[in-house]
Amino acid sequence: MLNKLSLFLSSILLIGLVACSSDNTTSGASTTPQDSLVYGRGGDSVSLDPATVTDGESFKVTENIYDTLVKFGDMDTKIHPSLATDWKISNDGLTYTFTLQEGVKFHDGSSFNADAVVYNFKRWMDPEESEKGKFAMYRAMFGGYKGDESHIIKEVKAIDENTVQFTLNRPQAPFLKNLTMTSFAIASPKALEKYGEKFNENPVGTGPFIFEKWQRNDKIVLKKNDDYWMDGYPKLKTVIFKAIPEGSARLNALKAGEIDMMDGVSPSDVSGIEKSSDLKTFTRPSMNIGYLGLNVTRGPLKNKDVRKALNHAVDKQAIIDAFYEGQAKPAKNPIPPTIQGYNEEIEAYSFDLEKAKSLLEKAGYPDGFDMEIWAMPVSRPYMPNAQKVAEAIQSTFKKIGVNASIKSYEWATYIEKVIGGEADSFLLGWTVQNGDADNLLYTLLDKTNVGSSNSARYESEEFHQLLTEAKTTVDPEKRNELYHKALETFHEDAPWIPLVHSTPVVAGKKNIKGFNPHPNSSVLMTKVEFK
């Protein structure tokens, strides 16, 4: 009996020890930080070669694959070192000499050096590529391509392996700010040669994450760069960018734990998210514009008075109240108030249907006309629900006799068709990527960018001359004066209906830390981790 009792007690003890061991293992697993993050967004990327695109969905991914020579701070627009550790500017503002980091490798194992920088810039400024419109952002920010009279950069040369020098044809006030843009991140020359036209699907940079795979219209998977030059980073092992077009479906996925972060948060959902014990919000300072572009080459929209009439037929405050929950301000200039050059003296087009009708009559359209409004299929930081905004505009246009039908396409197709000039009017927007007025005004509205980023097809010689002078003027007060005059010209010609400057919101799990909601809309995951 004693032996049986002893055996029984030993069995009970063993079971208890196993149970305790199991509990400890489970507990240990639950306290291990999560190292994979899924980011839900409204649409897929167009390309993973950032030099060839202008859309934010592409930049969200590429800024995690590549690095630029210099960068902004976590939450400011001051210039900080990145691939370049130091730089010197000549007294005449024409020569920039950069000292580069040593020992940095591209993801394919090839070396980052001065020759790689030269290779990338020669690629972007190639006049043969300019005929294809391939590097539109380079043209917009640096005044053209090699051989163009307006081209800012005269020469880029390697002084030695770790020193690269830029010589300019004339000073450019935002030159360093331009170099912070993801469009001018440095790609592997070896990979560019290897993949050719397929490089956009096989990106290779020096950034914190390495491209792994892309399932179109579904997800892009990035993995940690274990050899990243920034000590201790990145924190995450995997980042997945997941396309979920419908906003409520994205939020449901976040609540269900299927994704860890999301953008394009509907303003009406912010309060509920902030009350959640599991979720939190990240609010970006506003540096954007949401607008209705008017194609000045199509039908009645060729007439300036028609475009002015349509400006008077939009109730911006009603749109803000209905779809932004107060998290936006009415726009009267194309650039936001936080950007130097903003013209406070501009008198906004009032919501005045009688004035709109009078202008239509003056233009020869007393009974109105038919047109199309194109609405984005994705949620954007400056416009969480373009379809609803389009319907609101459609409703007030009808009151002045303008019958507008609403159309939409898949995101990449939408961008392509809008750039191609197929839309009468189109909802779009822009976040100022480099904190400078030139980034928005010259890119989206200068005559040299018609057929690429100037989708309104607006051509004004006066506007062009003012922007060109401002681009090369270093004196801040003089630049402000030039931009003020340019914005007066824009206001008079009315190629857009500026709608809102929004305050975008990103949502995520409560235990996320290290995410910085920069005003330029970056989604940089380098420092992100789970507590």
Image (spheres, rainbow, N blue to C red):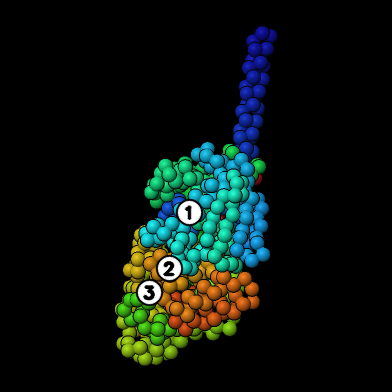
Residue 73 visible in the current orientation? no
Task: Classify 10 Å Cα crowding around label 3: few (below 14), some (14-19), many (20 and above).
Answer: many
Q: Where is residue 138 in the image (x, y as percent from the top left)?
A: 48, 60
Q: Quadrant of residue 456?
A: bottom left
**Up-down: is 60 above or below 391?**
above
**SS under mark 2:** helix
- Which residue appears at 46% of the width and 72% of the height? 446
Q: Mark 1 points at which residue?
A: 122
Three-letter amino acid code of the residue under disc 1: Lys
**Up-down: is 292 above or below 203?**
below
Mark 3 or mark 2: which comes first in sequence?
A: 3
Residue 6 visible in the current orientation? yes
Find out whether the residues at labels 3 and 1 contact each other: C-beta distance under 8 Å.
no
Three-letter amino acid code of the residue under disc 2: Asn
Relative horizontal placement of residue 34, taking residue 132 as reference (left or right): right
Q: Name the residue under label 2.
A: 449
